[in-house]
Each structure stands twice: as C-alpha cells, then as structure tokens.
Image (cartoon, coloured by chain):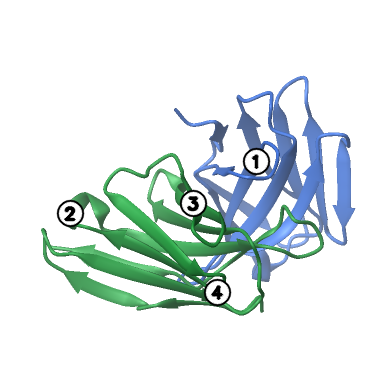
Amino acid sequence: DQQVKQNSPSLSVQEGRISILNCDYTNSMFDYFLWYKKYPAEGPTFLISISSIKDKNEDGRFTVFLNKSAKHLSLHIVPSQPGDSAVYFCAASAFGNQFYFGTGTSLTVIP
Amino acid sequence: DAGITQSPRHKVTETGTPVTLRCHQTENHRYMYWYRQDPGHGLRLIHYSYGVKDTDKGEVSDGYSVSRSKTEDFLLTLESATSSQTSVYFCAINGGRSYNEQFFGPGTRLTVL
C-alpha cells in the first residue's frame, strides 16, 4: 500500500510562472519529508526537505509547505525555469531509517 | 558529487541466472540503500544497511539478498533473476547537511529476458 502518493503524474507550466507539486501521505509517524529531482538516465538529486516541526522551508526559488493535519505537502517553484523540467519525487521517513517515495510528477516548463 | 558509483551500469541477463550489482561509496557513510524504480511505482526500497554486516529488509525485498562486508561496498544479489526484476536499480547513501538527505548513484539498468 502506497504510503506516499503523488496523484498528478504530470504538470506543465509556463516559464516564469509558479509550479506547485503536491504530495499526500498516510503514515502519521513520518517526521521528515524531502523532495528530489530526477533527470532521465541520472539518479535523483536532493532538492529540499522539511521537518515535521516546521510548516515551511525555503531555499531560493524552492519552498516546501507541510500541512500535518491534512497529511499533505507541496513544493512551490517560483519562478519556474526550463531547466526545472524533470521528474520530482517526494519522500518521507520515520526516524530516518527507511524512506518512502511517491510515484513522481513529471514537470515540463514551457519557454 | 557524493562519491557513489554503481556497476555495471547496464546489464542484460536471462531468467534464472544469478546477478550481482555493486554499489561503492567513498564517503564513509554508515547507511546505504538499494532501491528499484519502475513506472507507476516510483522508487521502492529493497534493502538497506546500517553498518558492516548489518542489513534489513525494505518494502520489496523478496527475491533479493544483500551483503556488506566493507563500509564502502553494498552488494545486491538476485539469486535467480525473473522478468519482474527488470528495472532500474539505484543505490543511495545518507549524508549532506542533514543525516536524512540521501545521495543517489547513477543507477543500473537491468533487463531480464
């Protein structure tokens, strides 16, 4: 049973606009959440993370929001750039040992 | 780059043959992981290791075994490969600014005919 879900397989956004990628989880024991970016034929690369004690974390153009009551997190990319076109995975862990990944959202930023 | 290599990068094999994939790290990290990536499933954890000779199962461990005799090497073995094990396999280590951040290797594309 999928504990981390990304219900949108794909998303297209115009360059310069905001990209919002969503992720839902079911396990209330998850205490750390991460976003990864993946280009074809490469391994995923870490993008940004958030602890369950926070509700927002920013790093440059990337912001992750966590809504614990809704068991929902989102990644905002502003402004979106063509180089952001990739597959984005959210992931969650409980106590840092095992990581559970979503199925990914393919983002296309249109120039 | 986090200093993770995987070998081989590509492999084609036949059903029923044993296959071993190798992950090598130069970062001296304690935790190492093996994932498989499949369309519609994202990344799923096969096995992980929290030290030399210390390993544990992930969510899709059936048909796979692992070994870690040295800190730097984590081996994934398919004792008798099946077509359902055709996938892209990624190794990862923990590290970075937080122990929770994982660095991934470049992946191994395995095809079982």
Residue A22 falls left or right of residue A50: left
Q: Mark 3 points at which residue?
A: B55
Quick check: marks 3 and 2 in contact, CB under 8 Å?
A: no
**Distance from Cα at disc 3 to Cα at disc 2:** 25 Å
Q: Is label 3 or label 1 in front?
A: 3
Residue positioned 72% across, 66% down in the render: A81
Considering the numbered disc 1 on the image, is that residue within a helix, a strand or a loop? strand
Q: Is residue A48 above or below residue A64?
A: below
Residue positioned 66% across, 67% down in the render: B29
- State the blue chain: A
Considering the numbered disc 4 on the image, is that residue within a helix, a strand or a loop? loop
Q: Is label 4 or label 1 in front?
A: 4
Which numbered circle lies on residue A49? none
Q: Name the residue under label 2.
A: B83
Residue B76 falls left or right of residue A49: left
Q: What residue type is labelled 4?
A: Glu
**Distance from Cα at disc 3 to Cα at disc 1:** 20 Å
Q: Mark 4 points at which residue?
A: B72
Which badge, 4 or 2, is on the more N-terminal residue?
A: 4
Q: In this view, does B106 lie above or below B93?
A: below
- Report which colour depicts chain B: green
Q: How would you rate the neighbour count of disc 2 (Cα within 10 Å): few for under 14, some for 14-19, many for 20 or more? A: some
